[in-house]
Image (cartoon, rainbow, N blue to C red):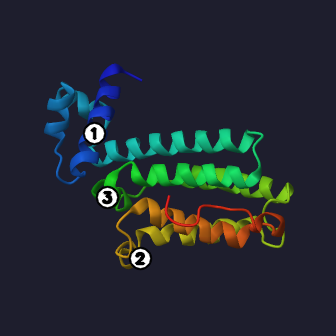
Amino acid sequence: MSIKRDQLIKTGEALFIKYGMRRVTVEEICREANVSKPTFYKYFKNKEDLARRIDEIWVEEALQKVEEIEESEMAFPEKLMQILEVKQEITAKPGPEFLNDLMNLDIDVSHAYKRVMHFFINSQRERNLREEFRPEFLLAAFTVLNNMQYDPKIRALYDDAEILAGDIFKLFYYGALSPEHRETSLPKNGK
């Protein structure tokens, strides 16, 4: 990756987090990054394309953390708690305005879903998740519950997007956990 492209990504990330994507112009990104507009357009079609790349980087980082957690020797309930922290971290990272902007972009997350499916299948093999559910159903349920965080009526119930993400996560996993793990303690309230 080029230094100028990296600088555009870092600058765009900082400005989008601070002001939201709609209130930031390509000109502002270029000025703050000390990069010309033609250079910006060499790497990105528009600021939405830059926002997609920022989101992809965040998802890649989160998936790497989840993979490290999955491969660790810690007990399954502890893995779930750490995955919850990763989920809450990625939800909080963009801030409320940029998160809304990202939700309106058409971002391909199929690779993330494949990774989650892999986790579900392995967790069932290890008898950490209930075996009577097909992994495809677990993924569909996870997707439906995850999409709840984008419902304006549900989001209005929460002042903190991290707490909403945590509640959704706990609802899914308490229902999907194997009987041996259901009694373990995931966080009761909030973070």
Residue 6 location, x and y as percent? 35, 27
Residue to which mark 3 is pinned: 96
**Is 35 in front, or is 179?**
179
Residue 136 location, x and y as percent? 71, 67
Residue 96 location, x and y as percent? 31, 58
Task: Determine the CA span between mark 2 and mark 3.
Answer: 14 Å
Residue 23 location, x and y as percent? 17, 52
Identity of the amino acid at label 3? Pro
* Residue at image location 66% in from the left, 54% down from the top: 80
* Residue at image location 28% in from the left, 39% down from the top: 14
* Residue at image location 29% in from the left, 42% down from the top: 45
Structural crowding at the residue carrying mark 2, measured as other residues with C-alpha within 10 Å and reported as few (<14), some (14–19) or many (≥20) = few
Q: Quadrant of the N terminus?
A: top left
Residue to which mark 2 is pinned: 154
Q: Which mark is residue 14?
A: 1
Structural crowding at the residue carrying mark 1, measured as other residues with C-alpha within 10 Å and reported as few (<14), some (14–19) or many (≥20) = some
Whether label 1 touches label 3, CB < 8 Å: no
* Residue at image location 78% in from the left, 63% down from the top: 181
Task: Determine the CA span between mark 1 and mark 3.
Answer: 14 Å
Identity of the amino acid at label 1? Ala
Q: Is residue 42 left or right of residue 191?
A: left
Which type of secondary structure does the marked residue at label 2 adopt?
helix
Identity of the amino acid at label 2? Ile
State whether residue 114 appears in this view: no
Which type of secondary structure does the marked residue at label 3 adopt?
helix
Q: Is residue 19 left or right of residue 142?
A: left
Q: Could you tell which of marks 2 and 3 lies nearer the N-terminus?
A: 3
Structural crowding at the residue carrying mark 3, measured as other residues with C-alpha within 10 Å and reported as few (<14), some (14–19) or many (≥20) = some
Above-or-below relation of 32 to 67: above
Q: Could you tell which of marks 1 and 2 lies nearer the N-terminus?
A: 1
